[in-house]
Structures are given as structure tokens and as C-alpha cells.
């Protein structure tokens, strides 16, 4: 059982062939896909897609890039939509100090607020962290994010950060970039951390793994991430697929069919 714990199927890149994309994922052994709406304009479409396909679930939140766009209607709407049975986490939320598309102080405030919302709703969080490792850890600790738990999406930190996140009850999600030649640091983290805290994801349409790099990513390709993890940890692919799938169902509180 493979689970793509993070994709963006509501994006325009999938508008013309969503049905085929989902079928290819099934054919590749992907049992569940979690599609992520990152701003208010995308939430309803994300939720609609999740309701159209039994194998899909939704994650809704305000990405740090969009933190500056929030208005008084945003939180009441997000709170209401997150009560839908198909919504399994608040995300992706967090900090992005690489592109800084929203002011840092706004990103920090919105991150804290959405952790509070997740705790209120009893949902895990999906954390975006890009070049903000220390600040991310500080907020997770100070806001008591251990209470809701969740996932560090597209993990890009070192082993010490991974260990700190794991100690707070978070799972480490590995994207297709683990297949890149320059991803030695990420492979080292994967080698050191236990399999029972690892998830796999595509972040489709981004971060396409080898051997498809340069093309649009899609959930079927999560298989190549799992294969690389198996290679790095020197264990069977089936064991990685089963464990990461079970980990995803555990964090999202879904009973396997």
C-alpha cells in the first residue's frame, strides 16, 4: 500500500487529465492521495475533488506565501470547511524565508494562529518549512504543537531537526527530491531515522523524482521515492510501502479499507 501524503491536484496542471492521473496512481499501487488547498481560493475545489474520489482526502490551510492575503472571513471559512469529514489536516502551514512572499512577522503570526485552530479542531498539521528551521522548531514548541502532532512536509532539515520533530510526535515526509544527485543530506536523514516515522509524498506537480525529472510530477511517481528510501535503508520496497502507508493512515486517523 502506497500513500501519497501530499499533492496539489487542484492546481491547473491537472485540469485536463485529473481522471487519468488518479487512475495511473491506482495502477501504480497508490491507495490514497491527500490533496492540499493552500489558500482560500482553492479550498472549495480541493474539497470537491476529495468528495468525487473515494481514495482522495483533503488538507486545507493557508500557505506562508499567502499569509498576507488573509482577511476577516478567512478563519471562519477555514474552520467551517475543516469540519468536513474529508478534511484530515490543517495545512500546509508554516514558514518560507526563501521566497518571502509574505512578510516574516505575518508568516509567524499566521503559523501560530493555524496551530491553534488545528488544536481546537482536533486535527494534525502539515508544516511547510523552507530556510526557517530554527523558527519552525521554536513555534512548534512554544505553541504546544505536540498536542495536535502532524507532518513536516518536504523535509529539508538535518538529522538533529528531524529528531527534535520526531520527539514532538511529528512524522517526517520525504519527497521525490531524495532521488536527486545532490540530496545526500536528505538520504543521510532517511538512513538514520526509523521507518515508523517516515511518510512519502510527491508534492505534485512539483519535485518530480528521477527518472522523470523535468516533467510534471503526479501521485503515481511516489513509488520512486519509496524505492529510493528502500535503497537507502537497505530494506525491501514492500516493507517501505507498507510502513509509510500505515504511518499516513495513523497520522490522518483513517481506518484501512
Image (cartoon, grey):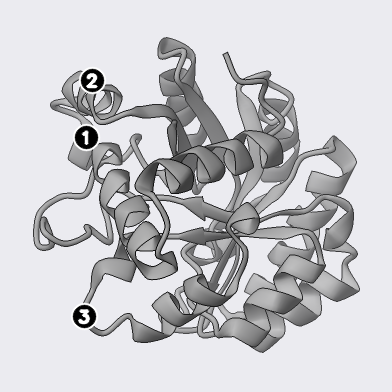
Quarter occupied by residue 171: bottom right
Query: Considering only order in the chain, which callout, 1 or 3, is on the residue closer to the N terminus?
Result: 1
- Give how far across and how far down residue 19 sits, in percent: 22, 19
- Percent coordinates x, y for residue 198 in the rendering: 56, 56
Callout 3: few (<14), some (14-19), or many (20+) C-alpha neighbours within 10 Å? Answer: few
Residue drawn at (55%, 43%) of the image: 243
Q: Is residue 212 left or right of residue 132?
A: left
Location of residue 138 in the rendering, given as x and y in whole percent from the top left corner: 79, 81
Against 134, is 240 above or below?
Answer: above
- Disc number placed over residue 14 in the picture, else none: 1
SS of the residue under disc 1: helix
Evaluate whether residue 151 shows in this view: yes
**CB atoms at circles 3 and 1 under 8 Å apart?**
no
> Which element is circle 3 on?
loop
In the drawing, what numbered circle is on residue 162? none
**Location of mark 2 (residue):** 23
Q: CA distance from mark 1 to mark 2?
A: 13 Å
User: Is residue 80 placed above or below 198 in the rendered structure?
Assistant: above
Question: Around disc 2, counting alpha carbons within 10 Å, would you say few (fewer than 14), some (14 to 19), or many (20 or more)?
Answer: some
Vertical side of 191 occupied by 171: above or below: above
Mark 3 or mark 1, whichever is nearer to me: 3
Measuring from the top left, give residue 54's x and y in whole percent. 46, 13
- Give the distance between the C-alpha atoms of the residues marked 3 and 1, in whole angstroms: 28 Å
Q: Residue at x 64, y 57 (%)?
A: 197
Which residue in the protein does label 3 denote?
181
Amino acid at each position: 500500500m502506497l500513500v501519497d501524503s501530499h499533492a496539489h491536484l487542484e492546481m491547473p496542471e491537472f485540469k485536463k487529465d485529473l481522471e487519468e492521473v488518479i487512475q495511473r496512481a491506482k495502477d501504480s499501487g497508490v491507495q490514497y492521495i491527500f490533496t492540499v488547498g493552500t489558500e482560500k481560493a482553492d479550498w472549495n475545489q480541493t474539497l470537491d475533488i476529495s468528495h468525487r474520489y473515494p481514495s482522495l482526502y483533503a488538507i486545507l490551510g493557508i500557505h506562508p506565501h499567502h499569509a498576507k492575503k488573509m482577511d476577516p472571513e478567512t478563519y471562519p471559512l477555514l474552520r467551517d470547511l475543516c469540519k468536513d469529514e474529508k478534511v484530515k489536516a490543517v495545512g500546509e502551514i508554516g514558514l518560507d524565508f526563501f521566497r518571502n512572499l509574505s512578510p516574516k512577522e505575518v508568516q509567524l503570526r499566521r503559523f501560530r494562529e493555524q496551530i491553534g485552530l488545528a488544536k481546537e479542531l482536533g486535527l494534525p498539521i502539515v508544516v511547510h518549512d523552507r530556510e526557517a528551521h530554527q523558527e519552525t522548531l521554536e513555534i512548534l514548541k512554544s505553541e504546544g504543537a505536540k498536542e495536535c502532532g502532524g507532518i513536516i512536509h518536504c523535509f529539508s532539515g538535518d538529522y538533529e531537526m528531524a529528531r527534535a520533530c520526531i520527539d514532538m510526535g511529528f512524522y517526517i515526509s520525504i519527497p521525490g527530491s531524495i532521488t536527486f544527485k545532490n540530496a545526500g543530506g536528505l538520504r543521510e536523514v532517511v538512513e538514520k531515522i526509523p521507518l515508523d516515522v517516515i511518510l512519502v509524498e510527491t508534492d505534485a506537480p512539483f519535485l518530480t523524482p528521477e527518472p522523470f525529472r523535468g516533467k510534471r510530477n503526479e501521485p503515481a511517481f511516489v513509488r520512486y521515492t519509496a524505492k529510493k528510501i528502500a535503497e537507502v535503508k537497505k530494506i525491501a520496497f514492500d516493507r517501505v510501502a507498507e510502513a509509510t502507508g500505515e504511518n499516513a493512515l495513523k497520522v490522518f486517523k483513517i481506518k484501512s479499507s
